[in-house]
Amino acid sequence: MAREQALDSAVRGDDVPSPIRVLIVDDHEVLGDSLSRVLDEEPDMVAVGLAQSLAQARTRVATNAPDVLLLDRRLPDGDGVDAIAELRELRPSMSVVVLTASAGDDVLVRAIEAGAAGFVSKTRGLQEVTSAVRAAAAGEAVISPEMLSRLLPKLRRGAGPDPDLTRREQEVLEMLARGLSNAAIAEELHVSVHTVRNHIANLSAKLGAHSKLEALSIAVRRGLVAAG
């Protein structure tokens, strides 16, 4: 459906956003096919491929240019979480959402430290997957405030240069640590969501991060913001 609408818009010359390109990495063929169908039925996203191993994922990330990667942890040729950093190097603008079943906090912490944008449970409805894809594509952290407050204190501490954050960027960072969305931060600061996105982009650049959750992870590990 997304492909057809994009084509129709191109023919009409409409100025509409391109659909969110999603690559699914999961060795369960039935689940992967189901996710692909659900994504293709959404008007604003399209499944650009299904990989059943990390080897296939590397190839398809490089050739299919996904905006969001739905990544299972347990794959035939390795641990998906361990491969996050490598996969993101192939396409730095790509957001990675980890598909979880019963992963422990240590696995989730490793995923955050590797730069994942968040998590979505395999046991929840498919509608939650599409919501997670939209959130990740919009730069949101795909994680509940409760999970965030539980995991942040478990991040490994590390040294690094102190970024020259402005007072407002520091305020935004502290609100991110509370699990607030861009819209909630905008409301609390009485600014537009666009302004909040600019602040997050600036502080992320200063921290060398490519996502909101990664920026928060780096800040916590360097002691720039309290963890919970």
Image: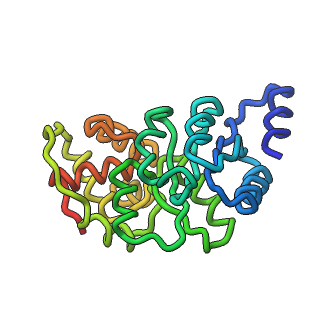
Nearer to the camera, 2 or 72: 72
Say left or right for 152 vs 102. left
Nearer to the camera, 29 or 219: 29
Say left or right for 57 vs 83. right
Residue pictured at 43% horizontal, 39% vertical: 86
Residue pictured at 39% horizontal, 63% vertical: 108
Using the image, determine if residue 112 lies above or below residue 204: below
Q: Position of residue 35 (x, y in %)?
A: 71, 58
Q: Position of residue 142 (x, y in %)?
A: 48, 59
Residue pictured at 61% horizontal, 50% vertical: 25
Using the image, determine if residue 119 lies above or below residue 116: below
Nearer to the camera, 171 or 27: 27
Q: Position of residue 184 (x, y in %)?
A: 42, 61
Please say which color scheme the image uses. Answer: rainbow
Say left or right for 62 vs 113. right
Nearer to the camera, 49 or 181: 49
In this figure, what is the number of numbered marks? 0
Identify the residue at the far front of this view: 77
Position of the C terminus by quadrant:
bottom left
Using the image, determine if residue 228 lies above or below residue 85: below
Q: Position of residue 10 (x, y in %)?
A: 80, 28
Say left or right for 164 vs 13. left
Using the image, determine if residue 164 lies above or below residue 186: above
